[in-house]
Amino acid sequence: MYSIFLKEIRQFFSSLVGYISIGLFLVLSTLFTFVFPATSILDTGFASLDSFFSNAPLFFLFLIPAISMGMFAEEYKTGTIELLLTRPLSLNQIILGKFLAAFALVVFAVLPTLVYYYTIYNLAIPIGNVDTGGIIGSYFGLLLLAASFVALASFASSISNNQIVAFLIGVLFCFLFYMGLDFIAQLPIFVGRSDYFVEHLGINAHYLSMSRGVIDTRDLIYFLSLIGIFLLLTKLVMSKKK
């Protein structure tokens, strides 16, 4: 599994797509957090990173499928999937190695944003007057959301041998689980009946809960279940192709 992990990391950074994806995420998140007046935390008068945590999932909708689109699709296209499956590795090890590599890349992209916390910590009056616990909870929720998107995008990559198609399907899946179910819950057929249930099938409700700094067991179970289900679906698709 470790060899798969390293292979994916090296492959990602061997192309411009990797650097462009992470660079674009950091540029956009910085612009929306500090520069654009509508979302800049410098114009709110509060030492808070709410703006960043509100916009980051929207950037992840494109960043994570871009990172994960070649995870399996490229293996199918080049024919290296047969070679990979003949190695002394189980499907679980292959899938988990690729999943952890993609997640590690997302963590690598998020790490520089800790500078945002350092900035508001020093700009606050008095210095340090920030809700550190809430920010830690928000980062934790953001990483769980990212892991969920990686699982969704991995499944998308496993069902196509074309990276562009895998990217588009990944964006669709991530959008559906992040925002799509919220829109569905607002349909007249669900309002006043099962809108709360449908809304909580989506990621956004659980992410917003954790963004308040509240780490609820129900939210943890939801994220871990979503990740597990889509990794299992990926394994089923791979087993069928094998």
Image (cartoon, rainbow, N blue to C red):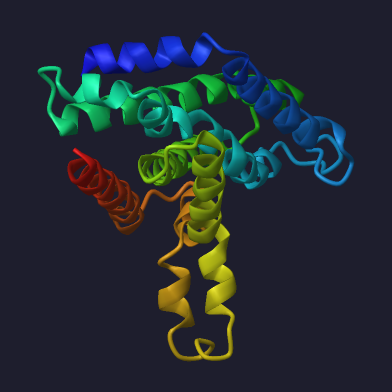
Residue 137 in view of the camera: yes
Picture quadrant of residue 61? top right
Q: Residue at x 48, y 34 (%)?
A: 69
Q: Position of residue 62 (x, y in %)?
A: 61, 40
Which residue is at a point 45% across and 77% down the rendered structure image? 196
Left or right, residue 217 beside residue 112: left
Q: Is residue 125 left or right of residue 208?
A: right
Q: Nearer the viewer, residue 3 or 186?
A: 3
Residue 143: horizontal and vertical position, in percent? 45, 36
Image point (23%, 14%), residue name:
2
Q: Name the outermost residue toward the right.
A: 37
Where 15 falls versus 62 (above or below)?
A: above
Q: Quadrant of the N terminus?
A: top left
Judge whether 154 appears above or below 88 on screen: below
- Quarter the C terminus occupies: top left
Q: Is residue 124 left or right of residue 153?
A: right
Question: Where's residue 197, x and y in %?
Answer: 40, 76
